[in-house]
Image: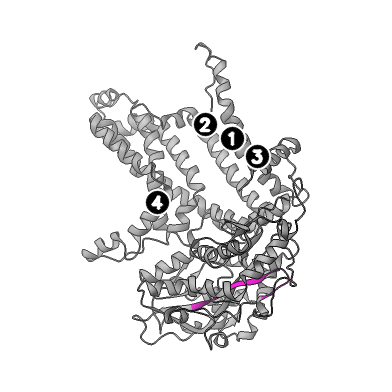
Amino acid sequence: MSDQPVPGRRRPVRGPAGFVLPALVLLLVVMMWPLLQLLYRSFMTPSFSLDKYRGLLTDGVSVTILTRTIVMSLIVTVVTLLLAYPYAYAMTKVTPRTRAVLMALVLLPFWTSLMARTFAWLVLLQDTGVVNSLLGSVGVGPLSLIRNTTGVTIGMTQVLLPFMVLPLYGTMSKIDSRLMTAAVSLGAPARVAFRRVYLPLSMPGVVAGLTLVFIMSLGFYITPQILGSPQQAMISQLIATKIDRLLDFGAAGALSAVLIVITLLLLALMSRVVKPSEALGAAGAEE
Amino acid sequence: MLSRKHGAVGVGCLVVLGLAACGGTSSSASKPASETKSMTFVSFGGAYQDAQKKAMTDPYTAATKITMNHDGPTDYAKIKSMVESGNVQWDVVDADPFFPIGNCDKYAEKLDFSVIDKSKMPKEFVSDCSVPSMSYAYVLMYNKKKYPTPPQNWHDFFDTAKFPGKRALQNAAQGGGYEAALLADGVAKDKLYPLDYARAEKKLNTIKKDLVFWDTGAQSQQMMEKGEVDMLLAWTGRGYNAVKNGAPFAPQWNENMAVYDVFMVPKGAKNKAAAMKFISYATGAEAQAKLTETIPYSPINSDAKPKVDPLITSFLSTQPGVREKGIVQDQAWWAKNQDEATQKWTAWAAG
């Protein structure tokens, strides 16, 4: 995503554009090429037809799982936002040293392998696991925390939290705190000042975080596979079944196409509210 | 693994052909067995492939000086892609029977039975494009502490009043769930096929709230060892591992389902002739006995006499009496109906 030249600003130098070429070629060859082949296969079965797409409507499972994937992603996105908003807010209000600790707490798991973290959750959450032992010692449970929606939500939320916290923090750290003081001094109760001044100013971060987390949720595979049951299966798992077991590359391509279209629509929607470069750039916020 | 040469071919056709599939550009004729210096053996990985290395490929290399490269895990989508692109990297593959039976002469080579001796193998395990590589069974494993009176069959597995508790099935159409449900519902052993999906699913729904699923053998073993379920359909090999590690479980052999892996040769394999010779060796009495001594799967060669301890013996599907108590999955039916059954099962399990 390149910055558009802004009139009145200094024109960007042309030379460095060439520096993106190696990465671009790599992306074209190892990502776009197989992707295009997959899409091609979804239409050519073996001659042009929409059968694979029609098949998704009638195979008795694709629609269910697609709907579930969207619902599951919405749940995870909302839970992530509820956790991340106060967290990011706190990060703007503490001393630089505490902020560094809070940032590390978000990033540390981010640097650990997804597989390792998911298995760690499995160990923690299983019926005889650490969490249930603790609950048991105070006379609660055991609760069913894996092989259901709860397990998948916990696992996915933890993985995706940084993608909500970072854009939120990036936006919030740029909000001038004197605006709140001004609002209060002009007679607004704290709650009203938050709702009418702070919240609107933090919206670009919220929109960026929501979009990022939602889009990434759509593609989750390992977490629902390990912490869920078939009743929590998401679209990536269905694509894997279509390829591995059914050898139906066309149907897998059609499902992938649906996923890509949803993602692109969401990105387009987001870009109307906040510039993509800003949304993604916010993640690398000033520290 | 792409060799350098094939990598170059791939990129070349990418540049030239635009969107059209890259087919047939590098297919090379199969060479005579005497010219083969190395070939690639593919299996499902883990303890099983390690055992195959020890019992089959290492001794074979020692005897013939042919290097056996290991790759894996077995992946039917990959075989399909290899055959369609005319660039087959694998020579011998350990697979589920449905794949070579259902794709005989399409994705699997016909086997050369003048090289491979099938006379010592169970007849119903052999097809034109596959021979068994070992056998085992799906059994009902139950917690001995929880059920002092053991469940006797799949009917008891579905009886949550008499046997309360969580149970588990394998999340796969051919994982035995359909057959178990139909047997529990009173279908006779010899009347199971063609499977009545609707009837099976209706029966499965009666225990759905007490049911969890496992995807990998390791998961099923963990369920037994952590006491996460009280009974489950499990592979005998995993049942043995769990019991050896102290899980208070025992197998119920009534209505066990005999299953087996097969050796196949992908269509267009570069070392087809040498592959036949290797399969002949790997299905021989010596290799089969050694395999069972390394991992608790049953030999498929009637001359194989593995020396194993009583616990292993108690999990072998070749013990006297076991075959008579069980059924054999109809692999010919499964080969024909794998896709439909997988669609049905996926829809049922996900619903």
Q: Quadrant of residue B150?
A: bottom left
In this picture, residue A214 sits left or right of residue A52: left
Q: Which residue is mark 1?
A: A27
Q: Is residue B138 magenta?
A: yes
Q: Can the viewer see residue B79?
A: yes
* In the depicted structure, whether residue A103 falls above or below residue B26: above
What's drawn in magenta, residue-wise?
A: B126-139
Amino acid residing under circle 3? Trp
Q: Tell me the CA gap for discs 2 and 3.
A: 26 Å
- Letter of the chain that mark 4 sits on in the rendering: A
Please tell me whether mark 2 sits on a helix, a strand or a loop.
Answer: helix
For the residue labelled by badge 3, is the local secondary structure a helix, a strand or a loop?
helix
Alpha carbons under labels 4 and 1: distance apart: 27 Å
Of labels 2 and 3, the one closer to you: 3
Front-most of A277 and B296?
B296
Query: Along the polypeptide, which appears first: circle 1 or circle 3?
Result: 1
Q: Which mark is residue B29?
A: none
- Which residue is depicted at the point 47% across and 43% down? A214
Distance from the alpha carbon under mark 1 to that under mark 2:
22 Å
Asked which secondary structure carries label 1, the reply is helix
